[in-house]
């Protein structure tokens, strides 16, 4: 039917336009990143990789990159270990208040980051941890722990109990069955938990704005500070590099357990 | 033979859960309590005082800021949710082999930096940006206009940034729904539009509500976008909190503003829960 086809085309056009809107800023940043003019404009006058070379020679950005990787790695690692340990008790334990504790572990997800940021700033200041790597790592544990706990919990809940039982029947100690059976079976969830935590830390700007900014500068913070005064293509190239760096974990997560489930849809 | 692998001894359970509880107490519970305590700090003497809150609620400027925050939040909801709905519908019902990729593509921006996406909007809406260049080229404008700062730019960028959250919460509701109802309706002769109005839309209400709440609470607590795109002209609670802590250095007042924001958060979550209970008891 002709009418039906028109409706279908219109429908797909609408979806396409919304996707275009959703991806527009990232596409535009990519295009502008090849420009060479010292000020921001569209379309680019020429195409070159010059601003990429500039970014890779900018000590400020390189330092911020290192800081971000260290903070992301440390907070995701700690959050994964602590979260996995808690997940075992939360899923398999039998104790009063287990359900309340499950809620407690997810509660930071509901907290507006800006409120948490102010609280963290007031807490870290007397401890002398403002503007330090330790402070940022601690702060990022609070926002990533709900995700690692939830992702690993769902992995534990899906575990095939008969495998463990078989291992135990055949004489494996609880520790052996944990090392040889449970951990390998949980691997996709453990990796996903780590990567999601890393991404949340790597892209986080609000908390970092409150508790860091002079000595400890993360990548989002460096970009924020830069674009407040200048908007030349160098920052576009840096942004493209940061997005590309985030894309690797995103693709791995999608392959492992699917992105939607990992972020909680 | 049955070997119990489920049973954990109490000491092990405690050992497993304690590091997590400790981490949350130190990095989450304590900072919030300390924030509340700081907001009650007296100007003189030792007893706690409400003076920061009195100052906040007596100043009409802050009422205006609160109103502004809520208006921007609501604007984001009424634009974002109707945009997220078709995408979620498409992803939930599509038979295409690209469905997985398209779903990932709709969610992936959520895991890229808000700062970068805001920057992207500065390029699009800026003085020499995409929109201005196009309008000048088409002779619609004689001179570039400033689109890149102010409430308009803030809302546009926020809508884009919050869209994946809207899509994901509607999608997770839709994928729990049964597609058979729609198929039955169209078999019985209902047109596409009828299926949409009579069946899909009413069944989607809880998902649309969840998306609205999520977008609203994220919009009213966002800082980076209003700060960068507001051009110093968008005053919302979040930017005020930032100014009070970093420029005015009045932590007690910043604490009071934060607790107020949290209060609005609580009110809207409670409202949402009452409405969703009513919706669910009706269906």
Image (cartoon, rainbow, N blue to C red):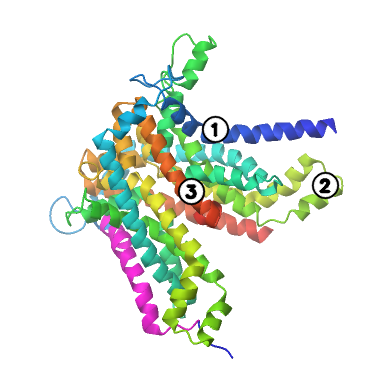
Asked if labels 2 and 1 share a chain, the reply is no
Residue A162 rendering spot, x and y as whole percentages = 58, 79
Residue B191 rendering spot, x and y as whole percentages = 81, 41
* Label 3, residues with CA under 10 Å away: few <14, some 14-19, many ≥20: many
Q: Is residue B95 left or right of residue B19?
A: right
Q: How many labels does the image show?
A: 3
Tell me, yes or no, whether the highlighted magenta stretch contains residue B277. no
Residues drawn in magenta: B6-35
**2 vs 1, front mark:** 1
Residue at horizontal 27%, vertical 33%?
Answer: A58
Residue A233 rendering spot, x and y as whole percentages = 37, 26
The CA distance from mark 3 to mark 1 is 21 Å
Asked if labels 3 and 2 share a chain, the reply is no
Residue B211 at least partly seen: yes
Disc 1 chain ID:
A
Quadrant of the rendering where the C terminus of chain A is positioned: bottom right
Q: In this view, does B1 lie to the left or right of A191?
A: right
* Label 2, residues with CA under 10 Å away: few <14, some 14-19, many ≥20: some
Instruction: Determine which residue is flagged by label 3.
Output: A250
Instruction: Determine which residue is flagged by label 2.
Output: B186
Instruction: Determine which residue is flagged by label 1.
Output: A21
């Amino acid at each position: 039917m002709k009418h039906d086809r028109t409706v279908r085309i219109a429908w797909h056009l609408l979806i396409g336009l919304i996707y275009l809107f959703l991806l527009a800023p990232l596409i535009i940043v990519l295009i502008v990143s090849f420009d060479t003019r010292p000020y921001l404009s569209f379309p680019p006058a020429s195409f070159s990789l010059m601003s990429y070379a500039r970014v890779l020679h900018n000590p400020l950005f390189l330092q911020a990159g290192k800081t971000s990787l260290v903070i992301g790695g440390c907070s995701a690692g700690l959050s994964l270990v602590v979260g996995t340990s808690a997940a075992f008790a939360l899923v398999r334990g039998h104790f009063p208040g287990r359900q309340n504790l499950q809620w407690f572990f997810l509660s930071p997800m509901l907290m507006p980051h800006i409120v948490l940021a102010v609280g963290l700033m007031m807490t870290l200041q007397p401890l002398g941890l403002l503007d330090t790597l330790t402070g940022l790592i601690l702060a990022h544990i609070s926002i990533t722990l709900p995700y690692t706990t939830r992702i690993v919990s769902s992995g534990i809940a899906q575990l095939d109990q008969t495998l463990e039982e078989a291992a135990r029947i055949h004489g494996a100690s609880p520790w052996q069955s944990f090392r040889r059976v449970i951990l390998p079976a949980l691997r996709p969830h453990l990796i996903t938990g780590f990567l999601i935590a890393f991404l949340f830390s790597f892209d986080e700007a609000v908390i970092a704005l409150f508790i860091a900014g002079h000595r400890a500068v993360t990548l989002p913070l460096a970009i924020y500070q830069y674009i407040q005064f200048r908007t030349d293509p160098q920052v576009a190239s840096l942004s493209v590099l940061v997005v590309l760096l985030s894309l690797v974990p995103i693709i791995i997560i999608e392959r492992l357990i699917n992105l939607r489930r990992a972020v909680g849809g | 033979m049955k070997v119990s692998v489920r049973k954990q001894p109490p000491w092990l359970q405690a050992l497993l859960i304690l590091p997590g509880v400790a981490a949350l107490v130190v990095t989450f519970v304590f900072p919030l309590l300390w924030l509340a305590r700081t907001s009650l700090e007296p100007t003189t003497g030792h007893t706690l005082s409400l003076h920061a809150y009195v100052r906040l609620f007596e100043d009409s400027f802050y009422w205006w800021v609160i109103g502004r925050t809520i208006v921007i939040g609501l604007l984001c909801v009424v634009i974002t949710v109707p945009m997220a709905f078709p995408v979620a519908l498409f992803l939930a019902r599509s038979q295409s082999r690209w469905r997985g990729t398209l779903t990932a593509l709709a969610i992936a921006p959520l895991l890229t930096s808000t700062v970068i996406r805001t920057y992207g909007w500065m390029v699009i809406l800026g003085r020499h940006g995409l929109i201005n260049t196009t309008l000048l080229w088409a002779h619609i404008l004689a001179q570039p206009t400033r689109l890149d700062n102010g409430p308009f730019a803030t809302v546009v960028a926020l809508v884009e940034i919050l869209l994946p959250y809207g899509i994901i919460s509607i999608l997770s509701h839709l994928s729990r729904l049964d597609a058979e109802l729609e198929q039955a309706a169209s078999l019985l002769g209902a047109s596409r539009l009828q299926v949409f109005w009579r069946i899909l839309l009413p069944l989607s209400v809880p998902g649309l509500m969840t998306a609205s709440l999520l977008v609203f609470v994220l919009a009213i607590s966002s800082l980076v976008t209003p700060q960068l795109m507001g051009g110093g002209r968008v005053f919302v609670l979040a930017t005020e909190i930032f100014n009070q802590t970093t420029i005015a250095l009045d932590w007690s007042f910043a604490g009071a503003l934060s607790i107020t924001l949290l209060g609005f958060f609580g009110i809207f979550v409670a409202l949402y829960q009452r409405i969703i209970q009513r919706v669910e008891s009706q269906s």
